[in-house]
Amino acid sequence: MGIAATRIAAGPETAVLDPEDDAKRRRELRAFLMSRRARLRPADVGLPDTARRRTPGLRREEVAQLAGLSTEWYTLFEMAKDTGVSQRTLDAVSTALKLTPAEQKHLYQLATGTLPAIAPDQTVDPTLRDVLDGYHTGPAMLLNVRMDVVAANPLAVAIFGDLAAAPDFQQNWLWYLYENHHMIGEWESQARELTATFRASLCEHANDPAYSRLLNKLLETSETFRRFWAEHDVGELEDVPPLTMTHPTYGPLRFTMRVLAQPGATNAFYCCFLVPDEPTTNAPAYRDLRRSLEP
C-alpha cells in the first residue's frame, strides 16, 4: 500500500510559473531525480545487489519500494508528468534518495512549480555595512542570493579587488572563482560546491533574467562549469570548503567561510566572513596588510 499523492496548491505568497518556465522546471525535475537515483548503489540503501545493471544507480522500482509508492506513480513523477504530489510523498522520496536538506528544498520547489512572488528588499542595512567594516581579522563580504558582491570590507577589497564596483559578471563571486582558478588551491572542490549553491538559488529565482544571463555565460565560457552543472548537485553556501589561494601580492592564504546570515523573508543577503588560519594570520605580508588597513 503506497502513500497517497495529492496536489500541493500554490499558496497566496507564491506565484506559478508561466508555461515556458514550467517546461524548464519539468526538465530540471527529471534530470535532478535521475541524477540523485544514479548516484546511489543498492548497498547504500540496504538492498541486495543481485543482478547486473545496465546503468549505474538504483532502479525506479527500487526507489518506489523504498518510498512506499507504486512503481507506476514514481515513474510518472520522475518523468515530470502532472501526477500531483503531497508533502508527505516528497518527504518519502527525499528519504529514499537520501537527499540533503538543500536537495530536499530543491525537490519541493521543482515538484510544486511555485516561486516566491515578492523578492526580499535588496537595500543594504547600514548595520550590516558597519559589521563588515568592523571585522579586521579577515575579508568580509555581503552577497545577494545570486552571489553578487554588494559590499565588502577593506581587506576583501585589497585581496579580491573591488568586486562590488566591478561591471556585469565580474561582480559575481562564482564568476570570480572560475575566472581566477589559477590562484586557488583545490579549486574544483570550491567550484563544485559553489555551483551547487547557485543551482539551489536559481531554482528559487527562475523568473530573474539576471540568473539566466549568468548561467548562460558560465555555460558558454567554462567546460568545468558545464560538467559540474550536468551533475545536478544542490548545496548551501555554508557548505563551501576552505578557500586556499596563492595571491600574487600576499602569497599563500587560507580562509574558512562563516555565513552569519542567510537570505530569508526579511534578509536578502549572505553575510560572509573569511576567517584566516594561523599560518595566514602570522604571515608577514598578510599581517602588514591588516595593519595598513586598521583605523
Image (cartoon, rainbow, N blue to C red):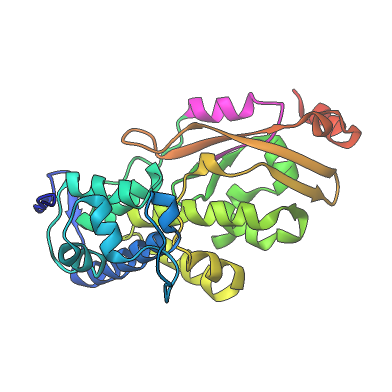
Q: How many marks?
A: 0
Q: Residue furthest front?
A: 50
Q: Residue furthest right?
A: 284
Residue 29: say if magenta: no
Percent coordinates x, y for residue 219 in the rendering: 52, 72
Q: Quadrant of residue 52?
A: bottom left
Residue 141: say if magenta: yes
Query: Relative to residue 129, is residue 246 depicted above or below?
Result: below
Closer to the camera in the image, 81 or 116: 81
**Which residue is drawn at the image coordinates 71% and 59% (left, top)?**
180
Q: Quadrant of residue 255?
A: top right
Q: In this picture, which residue range is highlighted in magenta?
A: 126-142
**Which residue is drawn at the image coordinates 16% and 67% (left, top)?**
72
Percent coordinates x, y for residue 185 in the rendering: 75, 52
Percent coordinates x, y for residue 173 in the rendering: 58, 52
Q: Is residue 236 visible?
A: yes
Left or right, 209 with reference to 230? left
**Which residue is drawn at the image coordinates 24% and 51% (left, top)?**
67
Q: Is residue 222 visible?
A: no
Percent coordinates x, y for residue 277 in the rendering: 75, 31
